[in-house]
Image (cartoon, grey):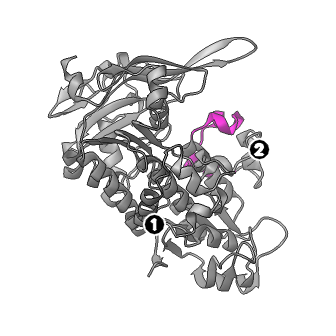
Amino acid sequence: MEQKKDTLLEIHNLSVSFSMYGHGFERTNLKVISDLHLTVHPGEIVAIAGSSGSGKSLLASAILGILPDNAVVEGHLHYKGQELTPDLQKKLCGKEIALVPQSVAYLDPLMKVGAQVDGHCRPKPVQKRRKLFERLQLPDNTPRLYPFQLSGGMARRVLVSTALITDAELIIADEPTPGMSLYQALEALKMFREMADEGKAVVLITHDIDLAVEFADRVAVFYAGTTVETAPVSDFKAGVDALRHPYSKALWRALPQNGFEPVPGFQPYAGNLPRGCLFAPRCPYRTAECERQVPPVRELRGGEVRCYHGT
Amino acid sequence: MALEAKNVYFRYDRKQPWVLEDCNIKVEKGERLAIFAPSGYGKSTLAMLLSGYIKPVRGDVLLDGKPLPKKGVCPVQLIYQHPEKAINPRWRLRRVLEESGRIDENVIRAFGIETAWLDRYPRELSGGELQRFCVARALMSGADYLICDEISTMLDVITQAQIWKVLLEEADKRNMGIIAVTHNRHLADRIATRTIDLSL
């Protein structure tokens, strides 16, 4: 608990479940994030990689307190050592903690882009916006366009600017780069890096592992709603043997430049999770132990892993 | 046998600038072409033009020298980046697949689509699973050409590899032509027989 002073964001034992109606008035709780751990230190970019539907975006929503009403959050969320209560979230959102949303649908369709990016900042940060748009290669007329007039990549760059224009201490970027050209994606990530180097922090949720490893300090790997491994970025660069969890290894092997070999099988559904390790049904190293009990998180070679057999 | 865009011009409105100006592209049957272009270049517009969703303002989109057929299943099928937007949310997935003809068990098995999924609604499946349906639907329609507009950018790399592996096997078997729009050079190297970079 002493550590909290030098962590910006600390997430401990977080779980998110949705209460849903089944048949008739029967209600069920669907757990989509379970027992998740993540710490973010100032000056750091933490990349979150992992399977589609593993709860990455939900984590972002949980941090910002913008989950739907039927969601139940349990566990500890601490920001700068303070518990992140709904009140505090409301106060910090958009000021100290900013989100780069995943979907273009987050833009107001009836509002011109320029005004949207300025947001509630007063005086209007017009100069800053111009500089941002220029760096992201958005054409001069962009502020006067409506969201439907933007291409996918342009919209993405607009979304990135909405977060960068604030003086946030922590940016949660949910898939900020798809649709951007390599140059633009690099430029966007460079801006995140500059931010982090000023002592702020970025949580970068992404599928683009190649790009993430160029800029991040640590990589957290998600699977079926929990973290299976956190590793220094150098391990991802070093290759498959430096990684700890079988899922991370599978992820690495599936990259187009590293063999393009998929592991068979699917991520289990929320509500239908295996009793033991979540990856066990697809894991080549599974033993009876894995199927009995969820492995605890343990420290291993400067990272963390949730696996009995991780080396 | 080829799918070709010939001197294609397109703009969304007469007051707007051209999105595509004098664009020429040609892909033979059995060929797999990867396209790179900067964001906002008009790649998705090109994809929609090639698959007949929109008509060029000037120029032609030709399949074997003739315009795309106006009736029946289009032999050029487009697969979108967002599977959840390409599937009727109120249809069960069985109906989604049946839209393109009889369900081909082999294709379903190859994509690892489980029988139980067929009775679900789209919102009950993840993006990766839905994208399998979109690709399977396009394959079962018996199309000769597939236009893949960033079909795997939103998916994790394992799902990406799973989908592309089956897609390429099937395409090989049927000697299909593929145009893949992507930003990932490594992916392009894996999947394409030819790449063009429109940003140059």
Q: Position of residue A248 (x, y in %)?
A: 31, 41
Q: Which residues are magenta?
A: B104-126
Q: Residue under mark 1: which chain is it in?
A: B
Where is the C terminus of chain A found, in terms of image quarters?
top left
Residue B164 is at least partly visible in this image: no
Q: How many marks?
A: 2
Q: Is residue A125 above or below residue A136?
A: above
Which residue is tagged 1? B191
Where is the N terminus of chain A found, in terms of image quarters?
top left
Q: Is residue B108 above or below residue B140?
A: above
Mark 1 closeness class: few <14, some 14–19, many ≥20 residues within 10 Å: many
Residue B124 is at least partly visible in this image: yes
Q: Is residue B120 magenta?
A: yes
| Callout 1 amino acid | Ile
In depth, the one of A172 and B76 nearer the eye is: A172
Q: Position of residue B164 (x, y in %)?
A: 49, 57
Q: Is residue B132 above or below residue B185?
A: above
Q: Position of residue B150 (x, y in %)?
A: 53, 60
For mark 2, give the secondary structure: helix
Which residue is tagged 2? B95
* Quadrant in the picture for residue B22: bottom right
- Numbered mark located on residue B15 in the image: none
Q: Residue under mark 2: which chain is it in?
A: B
| Callout 2 amino acid | Arg
Q: Is residue B162 above or below residue A152?
A: above
* Quadrant in the picture for residue A49: top left
